[in-house]
Amino acid sequence: MNMNIKTTAAILLCTMTTMTATAQKEFDIEQLIRGGQHYSTLTPENRYLRWWGDTPVRLDVEQCAAVNGNKETTLFTLDDVNSIIGAKTIADSIHSLFYAKFPEKGKTITAVKNSHNRYLIDWDKKKVVWQQPCDGETEAETTSDGKRTAYLSADQLYIKDENGKTTQLSQDGSREIVYGQSVHRNEFGIINGMFWSPDGNRLAYYRMDQTMVADYPQVDIFTREAEYKPDKYPMAGMTSHQVKVGVYDLKKQKNVWLETGEPDDHYLTNIAWSPDEKTVYMFELNRKQNDCRLNSYDAITGKKIKELVRETSDKYVEPMNPIQFLPWDDSKFILQSQKDGYNHIYLYDKDGTLIRQLTKGQWVVLRVVGFSKNTKEVIYESNEVSPIQSNIFAVSTETAQTRRLDDGTGWHYATLNGDGSKIIDRMSAPKTPRKINLINTADASAQVYLNAADPWQGYNQPTIECGTIKAADNATDLYYSMVKPHDFDPAKKYPVVVYVYGGPHAHNVDATWHYGVRPWSVYMAQKGYIVFSVDNRGSENRGLAFEQATFHQLGQVEMTDQMKGVEFLKSLPYTDNDRFGVYGWSFGGFMTTSLMCNYPDVFKAGVAGGPVIDWKWYEVMYGERYMGTPEDNPEGYAKSSLIGKAKNLKGKLQLISGYNDATVVPQHCLSFIEDCIENGIQPDFFFYPGEKHGVAGYKNIHLNKRITQHFEDNLK
Amino acid sequence: MNMNIKTTAAILLCTMTTMTATAQKEFDIEQLIRGGQHYSTLTPENRYLRWWGDTPVRLDVEQCAAVNGNKETTLFTLDDVNSIIGAKTIADSIHSLFYAKFPEKGKTITAVKNSHNRYLIDWDKKKVVWQQPCDGETEAETTSDGKRTAYLSADQLYIKDENGKTTQLSQDGSREIVYGQSVHRNEFGIINGMFWSPDGNRLAYYRMDQTMVADYPQVDIFTREAEYKPDKYPMAGMTSHQVKVGVYDLKKQKNVWLETGEPDDHYLTNIAWSPDEKTVYMFELNRKQNDCRLNSYDAITGKKIKELVRETSDKYVEPMNPIQFLPWDDSKFILQSQKDGYNHIYLYDKDGTLIRQLTKGQWVVLRVVGFSKNTKEVIYESNEVSPIQSNIFAVSTETAQTRRLDDGTGWHYATLNGDGSKIIDRMSAPKTPRKINLINTADASAQVYLNAADPWQGYNQPTIECGTIKAADNATDLYYSMVKPHDFDPAKKYPVVVYVYGGPHAHNVDATWHYGVRPWSVYMAQKGYIVFSVDNRGSENRGLAFEQATFHQLGQVEMTDQMKGVEFLKSLPYTDNDRFGVYGWSFGGFMTTSLMCNYPDVFKAGVAGGPVIDWKWYEVMYGERYMGTPEDNPEGYAKSSLIGKAKNLKGKLQLISGYNDATVVPQHCLSFIEDCIENGIQPDFFFYPGEKHGVAGYKNIHLNKRITQHFEDNLK
């Protein structure tokens, strides 16, 4: 077993244990698992900050406070706010200041909202300077000054201007014709469907026609008699929805449709405005997802102006971020692309001419945070230091010179003030529960605002290790984490549970607190298990080749990598080779079922939550990106399908799904159950009524107890 | 423990064991359980007989043979039939003679049918004497001469006469407007929806309007993408369907609707014709089911002629059988009623005047078989000999004198020839696997046609016992059966599974072969369990007070009786009080869940199949008969509901349901699962995709293995 360790990640292979002479407390599941009654007791202290001009403001339920170093000064309280808005009843009151906003940079204005009205409070005048009713609005998107709102009401799209004038933009909105909401099932980074122009004079919005899309028949059992609640769900290879983009001009009171043309089932993604509000930019991708164009449209006429950039692939191109114009130069924008094999930042002029590649290297830009106006830099997070870290960098748009702005450890998340001169740096590291620093962009100097205490102090803490193994290609490093019981004795033999996700756009191992191991893994370690996770090829943050190794054969390469993890585990003297289990949810449920069916002699027990069973039942966008259509890639679909493989099962598998899972629909697990029945296999099975792709709230405790019990019954 | 044994049932308490010196075979689940690959090997030999005039004919796949004593003479073969109809292809051929009919008494005509045509073959002429195409017909009902057919095609009702002339009787037939099919969800003995008059000149038929009935949202997962398959399902207290009865006159080519009046949600049941075809009789019941009238209607005008008989109750009246006119006297009919506390036969004149009660006593008429014309008797089966037997009797319509026609043992089922002078008597008894006798009605003399060998010979046979215990009222005898391992040792302690149904219109214990114990019970006994069943109050064949003890509080009295069974079991030295389990399906699933939740310290494990969880989710007809509506009987519904009682569970309960159960819809078990989740209870759960209220075919083996394993895991 090759145990190559990246020299750049010296923090790795550190073993975290707490040794104390005194008796320590045991973790309770109600503390560890989200939804538990005492959940917060084991999570590090947290604080929520938002920039008000150049001042970081701490938002809390009862007050907002200005932060200066590690000192806080109360700005106003919830009582102040309710007094100023004249709230007389509970229904009229504002109940938390977590959602207070500071729309006008440098001004003394705070935006708050109760269930009936939006308010702008001017603290200089100590009064409400503007207000507007918001009854019946859903999915509201407000302009940066807080005074214009686009919203939905009974499926129709409306705009309300600062004077309360309301314009209805759609007439035919329905369950089937959807306005102003996220399209393409939230793929391609899409999370909403209304896009205000920078100064709020125009609104771009999606219109999605899904009349031609099949309904997945969801059932609501919580009505007098169960009711049919259909859910439009286009499955791989089936007819998909048709999206277009409208632009409404508030001054001209005129709507145009961007002339995006045929075929109708293309993807219109990552809408961006030019600073002058005259041009709309989008990445447009063919249904096959291997031909991506950045196009610009005239916001007044809807006509296409130009194809600025085109990227093709023999696998797929996946635009995830809109272009962003430089705040100090309206003629230039940045875009992110994986075209050199890793996600990097490129600077273009507004006509689509590449000026320069700003970042480069065998690591990925994780997120563009924003811009530092004074230094003409782009602020971004990347894993340049280590594949499992996230650190804050700046890159000069003029020289492409980069510099690190944080301490170079762990996992950082930056929030910039308006001009990018200051950064709120939220971070954790394997031994650092949580730290919040305030960074000065210019010289990267930092002040510590919060250094949270270790909430696990006084408990029997498991040993948590991290390292790398070689992938099945014998070349690629894969990162793993391993959790061992607090009283680990290398002379004993321990049962092992492999926790797996394995799919794209996710990872399990990183340099956050405790290497990001899941609370359930800690719980299992306390019960005497070793819990192991390895991020196989196909997972995120390791570059295009790593990600696309799984193309058109989801699960296959991933399994070979997971089996390298098993090989590693079996080489350890303290693992019991007869007591291996595997657990995962969603793609991890697919991996669990795949591993149980393909390596039936290895895993004695498994729990597959919300598992994909055959990619033909998964949605068009994600499914076809990685698998093509069932018609184009029959071999890939056959190889990855678990239908027909239930007969291989030897270990005890439990399938668990939300009864109303609208992501991995119940057709998956029910079809696998059928395959089991036809082959005389007896899996365990459980439905959470009303639950979707996750199990929410207190039911999550029930779920985690259930999963635990499955291993206790079958592995111990 | 009072162990009163009915003296009339001397056969009871007999203990059935086979002792042999040689090594015996073990039962295999594939032999014992329906759906298994070798199922028939353990069932007694069987033969199918049908009367052809006065000759019993044995029907088989390849031939029809006349039976004379225990001799058989081939009448014709399948090859003969296919040669005569001129079948040239497999599609044209008839593949089995099981369905051959002999429509014209005393004549040489046989009716057969392939998928395209109906044929009448005259064996004297050795040729087809009449034929007619039948393509596209469903639910076909043919007149007694075989020449006129009423049928459905694409939801519309048609009549085809002997000359092939086709008349479409309905235009608006649909999923919502249903013609010619069973109505009222098969309650009140209803099994079909078309009723030919005696000579085939008129057709009475049901029309059911269920547009106003809620759909239960069933989902078909076996399509490309799962599909919604709504199923009209009126739940207790909700809006029900509206039924009327049409009568079509073939000569006049005229349709009338019987003027049954308001309210529309009454029940129109047990349609019967007068011998002269001029009058239609029906039992009409109000929705509350406590007021039942026998009405007559003019078949030509549809007008109501008369209310002949009325029966009311402070609980319910349940008409289950149409009136039957005496074959030798068109002015008199018999009807069955429980009005004196037991189901008995009454003779009326055609105007509704009671002539006399024909049968009487603290036992029930199980079935009216028909009439003996020569002796002017009604032939019926009753449990007069013992509550768990069925014997064949005749009662004189003139003197009400009764006489037994069979041997007075076991369970008999009679089939009369045309004039009732001869009887095919199919029977079994606890030690008799199957016997078929031919009885001469006049003198009750019998000839043995078949005496089937014991198919269990050579196997390790369990001990099967039967007896009575006192019900929770300390007065009523309840019959139980008990299966013990073949190597039963009274010095040992055995785990016990109580198999329960407990609902109306069913029983588990009778004097059929092996006291009717279920093959699964035998399988469990082989695995070392004692399996016990007791027919509690509320079950069938014990009279009205016994049945109606459960009125408006289903499950409550039944549980107290089942607990008397448990008390009896615990009093036995060889039962292990810490290892009691309970299993049942449908009403038995309700009982199982009720017992597990109400007596959590008694039952360590249970399996509830297709369980009713709250009667408000069960259908109108059955549900309201026993429980009233949720609005009228809130206390009864609350007491019997299992929602809110999951928190009591201590034993391990597995719920199993057909995913597409259209009888006890999945809302029941899913709602109980939700109650478990909310209360931190971890039941086991399984769905059989595509299956309805039972699990069919080979999947039944999977199901029975699953149930067995649950007790092996939790009781052994």
Image (tube, coloured by chain):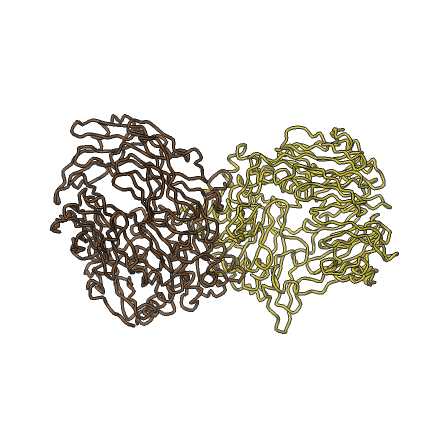
Chain colours: A brown, B yellow
Q: Which quadrant holds the N terminus of chain A?
A: bottom left
Residue that appears at 41% across and 46% down:
A691
Q: Is residue A414 above or below residue A495?
A: above
Q: Quadrant of residue A27?
A: bottom left
Q: Residue A8: image x %, image y %?
A: 20, 64
Q: Which quadrant holds the C terminus of chain A?
A: bottom left
Q: Residue A688: image x %, image y %?
A: 43, 49
Nearer the observer, B5 or A616: A616
Q: Residue B34: image x %, image y %?
A: 62, 59
Q: Quadrant of residue B482?
A: bottom right
Nearer the observer, B73 or B116: B116
Please give left or right for residue A247 compared with residue B261 in the image: left
From where the camera sits, is residue A531 visible? no
Q: Is residue A77 above or below residue B373?
A: above
From where the camera sits, is residue A79 visible? yes
Nearer the observer, A322 or B434: A322
Nearer the observer, A218 or A708: A218
- Total number of numbered labels? 0
Residue at the extreme right of the image, as rendered: B124
Q: Residue A127: image x %, image y %?
A: 20, 26
